[in-house]
Image (cartoon, rainbow, N blue to C red):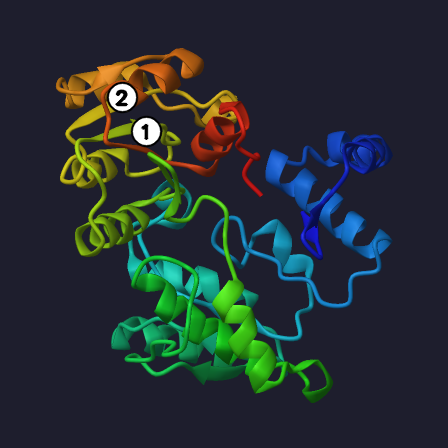
Amino acid sequence: MLVDGRPISREAFATWTAELRTTVLEVGASFFEATTAIALADFAARGVDIAVIEVGLGGRLDATNVVDPLVSAVTHIGLDHADYLGDSLEGIAREKAGIAKRGRPFVIGEADPALRAVLVQAAEAAGALPIVVDAAARYPGTLRLAGPHQRRNAAVARGVLEALPRDWRPTEDVLTRAFARASISGRMERRGAWLFDVAHNPSGVAVLVEGLRLDPVPQPVHALVGILADKDWRTMIDGIGTVAQRIWVTIAPSAPPERVWSLAAVAEAFPQVTVERDFDRALRLVHEGAGTTLVTGSFHTVGDAMARLPGFAPLG
């Protein structure tokens, strides 16, 4: 919850939690639903002109879909949250297209022609105005963000910015300077011998692996991995294993209890990994003898690690 780069204060978070607590309990809101409400209240209180709101899960039934956006967008369709959204990419695409709103631009970054067609069809059915970013589009200018996928993401972001009402569109000079200095905590972020990447699904891990192959890091790579139970963790660990010589699996302290993965099941599926339930101990052990220490698997894992390491600011 950032406004002009400043996170919500502890005091404001506590105030909004107290203010909304009764309603949250009455409706049985989830953690994400409650924090979405807190975020929107904080943005309003801080006089935000433009808010960038990221969907949590799917789109159609997501808490963030209460927003009537100036522009909405889908970057890429992957098999994520399959327990909730199903294991069909086309079905997931339709769920994500649920954020398309009548009369509003709907920017589509998905490169697969079949999935693109599903998104366009769903957007048109909703009365939205689909804008398809060219499948080969890559932002050609200076980009601070690491990883080849970020040039594709930047092209989609540019499409969103150009679809804003005229009074809100940035100039070309502003766009150029912004892309050159934009950064995202925990996305292929290197800090000395540490590498943080919130690859929290199979497609995210695939991007991480591709990035490490194109831009090698000091060896050996030790990975600290914490994944939520509703993710395809088997595929993810397989992918991480192609770039890491040793893997420790653990549980992030901030992970929602109902989504904590089974370390016993992980150990049974991957007997070569080291299981360490104590997060702080795992954080110490994984770094010993590593040329690069990779922390990945979820926002919880990366954020909890950053918050514990001396001199590191928490994620966000």
Tag 1's secondary structure?
Answer: strand
Estimate how packed mark 2 is, as few (under 14), some (14 to 19) or many (20 or more) residues with alpha carbons within 10 Å.
many
Residue at mark 2? 248
Residue 76 appears anywhere in the view: no
Residue found at x 62% / y 34%: 31
Could you say which disc has been placed on residue 105 in the image?
none
Q: In front here: 257 or 9? A: 9
Circle 2/circle 1 CB separation < 8 Å:
yes
What's under tag 2, amino acid-wise? Trp
Could you say which disc has been placed on residue 225 in the image?
1
- Which sits earlier in the primary sequence, circle 2 or circle 1? 1
How far separated are the C-alphas under marks 2 and 1?
Answer: 6 Å
| Quadrant of the rendered image containing residue 302 | top left
Above or below: residue 177 compared with residue 234: below
What's under tag 1, amino acid-wise? Val
Above or below: residue 295 compared with residue 112: above
Tag 2's secondary structure?
Answer: strand
Task: Report x, y in % for residue 103.
Answer: 63, 83
Q: In front here: 68 or 60? A: 68
Residue found at x 75% / y 29%: 25
Classify residue 93 as left or right of residue 126.
Answer: left
Task: Report x, y in % for residue 32.
Answer: 60, 40
Classify residue 258 as left or right of residue 235.
Answer: right
The quadrant in which the C terminus is found is top right
